[in-house]
């Protein structure tokens, strides 16, 4: 069973209650919504993965590039379809692996703090993105590093499967990741 939200972790900030589905039912929903109006159904899977997880345990393994260079704090698994994603927010360092699909990323330097409780698709549709936002497209197989404090949002450009690892840098890795 997975929890789905229009805004990731919306239940933690009192925005919405999650829809709970099996992964199989959710994948069927992703295909079904493409036959309707996908912008109206944006429930996205973005869940923290505990270290002892059975089914999503693969998501707790760091990419080789980061292994031994960082102190892993948490891992999140994401699964979504076109127009789904996470609104502008910031946190500690993160390595974002995309295993399937394409994602559009929006980036802002740390001097401009943004933490939204919106749907990234709505922000883009209404041209409600901060001045100076940088955009890039992540392809399947890419590892995208977001430094601590950088504001970022992501939106799936089709079906997407990804893993995010939040971490602190070890003293010896400060130079090698920048």
Image (cartoon, rainbow, N blue to C red):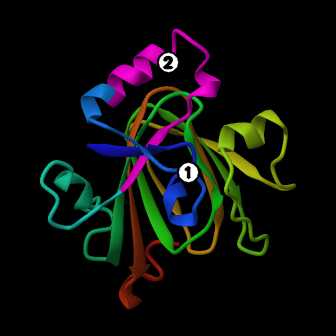
The verdict on residue 115 being magenta is no
Magenta residues, start to end: 26-47
Left or right of residue 94, residue 115 in this image: right
> Circle 1 sits on which residue?
16
Q: Between residue 47 and residue 21, name the one nearer to us.
A: 21
User: What percent of the width, then of the height, locates residue 162?
Assistant: 38, 45
Q: Quadrant of the N terminus?
A: top left
User: Mark 2 and mark 1: span between their CA atoms?
Assistant: 20 Å
Earlier along the polypeptide chain: callout 2 or callout 1? 1
Above or below for 141 versus 32: below
Look at 27% across and 34% down and name the residue there: 23
Q: Residues within 10 Å of mark 1 (few under 14, many from 20)?
A: some
**In terms of secondary structure, where does tag 1 sit?**
loop
- State the count of labels: 2
Look at 68% across and 37% down and name the residue there: 121
Say which mark, if any, is on residue 33. Answer: 2
User: What percent of the width, then of the height, locates residue 37?
Assistant: 61, 16
Q: Between residue 149 and residue 49, name the one nearer to us.
A: 49
Look at 73% across and 38% down and name the residue there: 122
Left or right of residue 10, residue 112 in this image: right
Q: Between residue 158 and residue 11, name the one nearer to us.
A: 11
Above or below for 116 versus 34: below
């Amino acid at each position: 069973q997975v929890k789905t939200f229009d805004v990731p972790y919306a239940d933690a900030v009192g925005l919405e209650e999650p829809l709970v589905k099996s992964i199989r039912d959710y994948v069927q929903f992703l295909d079904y919504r493409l036959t309707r109006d996908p912008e109206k159904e944006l429930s996205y899977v973005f869940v923290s993965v505990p270290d002892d997880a059975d089914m999503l345990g693969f998501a707790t393994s760091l990419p080789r590039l980061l292994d031994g260079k960082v102190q892993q704090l948490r891992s999140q698994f994401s699964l979504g379809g076109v127009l789904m994603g996470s609104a502008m927010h910031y946190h500690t360092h993160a390595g974002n692996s995309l295993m399937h699909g394409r994602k559009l990323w929006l980036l802002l330097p740390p001097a401009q703090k943004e933490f939204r409780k919106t749907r990234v698709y709505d922000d883009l549709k209404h041209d409600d993105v901060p001045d100076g936002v940088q955009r890039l497209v992540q392809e399947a197989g890419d590892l995208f590093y977001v430094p601590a404090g950088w504001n970022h949002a992501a939106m799936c450009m089709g079906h997407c499967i990804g893993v995010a690892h939040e971490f602190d840098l070890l003293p010896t890795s400060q130079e090698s990741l920048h």
